[in-house]
Image (cartoon, rainbow, N blue to C red):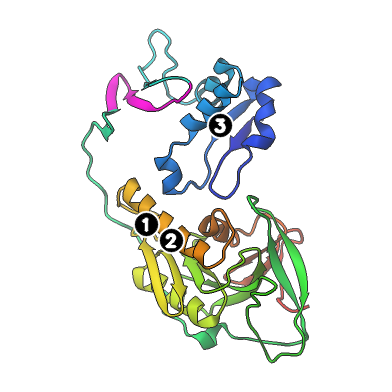
Amino acid sequence: MKILIREGSAAKNLEALKELFNIRPDMIMLCSDDLHPEILRNRHINKIIADLILQGYNIFDVLRSATLNPVMHYNLDSGLLREGDFADFIIVDSLSQMNVFETWINGRRVFGKGEIQFKYKPGGGINNFKCSKINANDIAVKNHNGRIRVIDTIEEELLTKELIVTTGDKEFLNADTASDVLKIVVKDRYFDSPPVVGFIRGFNLKKGAIASSVAHDSHNIISVGTNDEDITIAINEIVNMKGGLSVSNEGSVVSLKLNIAGIMTTSRCSHVADEYENLNEIVKSLGCEKKAPFMTLSFMALLVIPDLKIGDKGLFDVNKFELVPLFL
């Protein structure tokens, strides 16, 4: 077994694991996980390498974690600068910065002067969106006995906790911004089934709602919001686009379309990064304190990471590995 040290958008583990470079550098690799476009624009693996070298970690141990170690472990068909190998390498400005000037594969320069050096023809987009729009009545929650399960998020972690909240005797349950218990909704995108509704803490939105069709692993539509109207508008914007990200506040909506399967796009990274950062700024202006709100939201539908998650069939207790009701 090897350890892959991950620095993603929502989950980051380098700080906790980097001391392994001083213990077993031959057993570790660097990797990415769910990177948003603005991180790619600002560099990733090469930036991590530069930072580790500047911190005093052995230069060859650090370089090998992103080159030799993965090639040997996975038996990759990649050159290692040995005689007879394919000429696969990069040219950088310095080891303290690691800005990539050129990339060579099989002895051919494929990147240089900030541009790719080969021609390609994009394939056609594949998308599977069959659901229809919802209305506010579809996500109304009638109170039963006053105690509910709430997904409790942890900053920069994919783990969640189960929180039990007493709701009182109100007839319908809505988001409570004062205690940061917001409504979370999952809408199946493949079949026109009713949306599933739960509650979540940790996003700290004071107004509006966000929604996304990037929701591991099934990539259904998932939304968090402070009121049913904005949640409905945010979800319906995703339905209109057949996939993407959206922010709704007091009836107005801003969105980013993802035209390939609702999770990727043929637009340039720099363009998508600008639009994505704009969405993030809007979400922060609504009170959200998450560093990566959309990526954190996407993991709330990943039903294999403890403790409590939500899918198109309802709340899921990962420790018990079974569906559980909203109300206790």
Residue closest to the far bottom? 171
Q: In the rendered image, which residue does mark 3 sit on?
A: 30
Q: In the rendered image, which residue does mark 1 sit on?
A: 275
Q: Secondary structure at mark 3?
A: strand
Taking the spot 61% from the left edge, 20% from the top edge, the residue there is 56
Identify the amino acid type marked 2: Leu
Is residue 104 located in the magenta-colored stretch of the structure?
yes
Taking the spot 53% from the left edge, 48% from the top edge, the residue there is 9
Q: Residues within 10 Å of mark 1 (few under 14, many from 20)?
A: some
Residue closest to the far top? 83
**Separation of disc 1 and disc 3 at Cα?**
28 Å
Classify residue 124 by image quadrant.
bottom left
Q: Which mark is residue 279?
A: 2
Residue 174 appears at what percent x and percent y? Answer: 63, 82
Classify residue 109 by image quadrant.
top left
Query: Which mark sits nearer the N-terminus, 2 or 3?
Result: 3
Residue 171, compared with residue 183, is above or below; it is: below
Left or right: residue 255 compared with residue 24: left
Taking the spot 41% from the left edge, 18% from the top edge, the residue there is 79
Tell me, yes or no, whether the two marked residues, 1 and 2, touch with CB atoms within 8 Å: yes
> Can residue 237 be seen by looking at this rendering?
yes
* Quadrant in the picture for the C terminus: bottom right
Residue 31 appears at what percent x and percent y? Answer: 54, 35
Where are the magenta residues, as a range?
96-110
Left or right: residue 309 compared with residue 129: right
**Separation of disc 2 and disc 3 at Cα?**
29 Å
Left or right: residue 310 compared with residue 99: right
Mark count:
3
Identify the amino acid type marked 1: Glu
Q: Main secondary structure of the magenta part?
A: strand
Mark 2 or mark 3, whichever is nearer to me: 2
